[in-house]
Amino acid sequence: MTTTTCSGTVTALGQSALSLQGRRYAYIEIKRRDGRILRADDVVVLNEVGSLLHEGVEGRFHFDAARLKTATIRQLFGIRRNDGRWAYDAAQVRVTAAVQNIIQGALLAFVFVGIPFLLLGLLQLIYSIGTARLRHDEFFGSEDQGGGSTRQSEVIRI
C-alpha cells in the first residue's frame, strides 16, 4: 500500500467511532488548493494527530493505507497545519492490521482457509518494517506534489 500527501482544507468529517487509541472516521474530505476534493474513506486517526483535526483546518495531510481482512483502511498519520502546528504519529495501523491477519491466518491455517491471511499479514509486517523510515522522511521532508490535469469538480478517492 502507498502513502498519499494532500494540501488543502478539511471540508467534512464523517461519522466516527471513538476508542482509547483514537477515532475511526467513515470519511474525511479535503478541498485541495486547485479546487479538487480528495475523499478518504474509512480513516483511522490516532489521538495525537486527531487533536489537530477538525473541519476548516488548512495544511498538509499525510495518509497511509493497510489491508485488514477484506477491507482497506487508511491512517491519517501526519498533519502540518498552516498555522505552524504539526503532529506526526509513528504508530502504524499497518502493523496492527498485519498482526491481526497473522493471528487469524494462524488460527485458520489448519483448514487451509487461513493461509492467505497468514501470508498477507507476514508481507504487511515486512513491508511496514521496511518502509517505516520512508514514511517518516515523507512527513518531515515532503513537498506538495501536484497531480496531473483533472477537472476541478471531480472527487478524488484514495
Image (cartoon, rainbow, N blue to C red):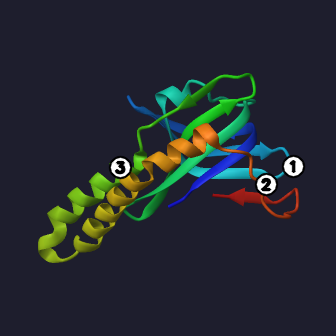
Judge by depth and name the residue closer to the eye, 138 or 116.
138
State left or right for residue 141 relative to residue 55.
Answer: left
Name the amino acid, label 1.
Answer: Asp
Q: Nearer the viewer, mark 1 or mark 2?
A: 2
Q: Earlier in the sequence, mark 1 or mark 3?
A: 1
Spatial CA span between label 3 and label 2: 29 Å
- Badge 1 is on which residue? 34
Judge by depth and name the residue closer to the eye, 132 or 68.
132
Q: Secondary structure at mark 2?
A: loop
Q: Secondary structure at mark 1?
A: loop
What residue appears at the point 54 percent right and 46 percent down from the top-left corner?
A: 43
Spatial CA span between label 1 and label 3: 34 Å
Name the amino acid, label 3.
Answer: Val
- Badge 2 is on which residue? 146
Q: Earlier in the sequence, mark 3 or mark 2?
A: 3
Location of residue 91 with respect to 96 vertically, above or below:
above
| Residue 54 in view | yes
Q: Position of residue 46 (x, y in %)?
A: 47, 34
State the mark number for residue 141. none
Q: Residues within 10 Å of mark 2 (few under 14, many from 20)?
A: few
Q: Secondary structure at mark 3?
A: helix
| Residue 25 in view | no
Quadrant of image for the C terminus: bottom right
Q: Nearer the viewer, mark 3 or mark 2?
A: 2
Return the residue found at the far left: 110
Q: Is there CB contact under 8 Å for labels 1 and 3?
A: no
Name the amino acid, label 2.
Answer: Gly
Q: Position of residue 75 (x, y in %)?
A: 51, 45
Location of residue 22 with respect to 143 vertically, above or below:
above
State left or right for residue 59 relative to residue 104.
Answer: right
- Badge 3 is on which residue? 95
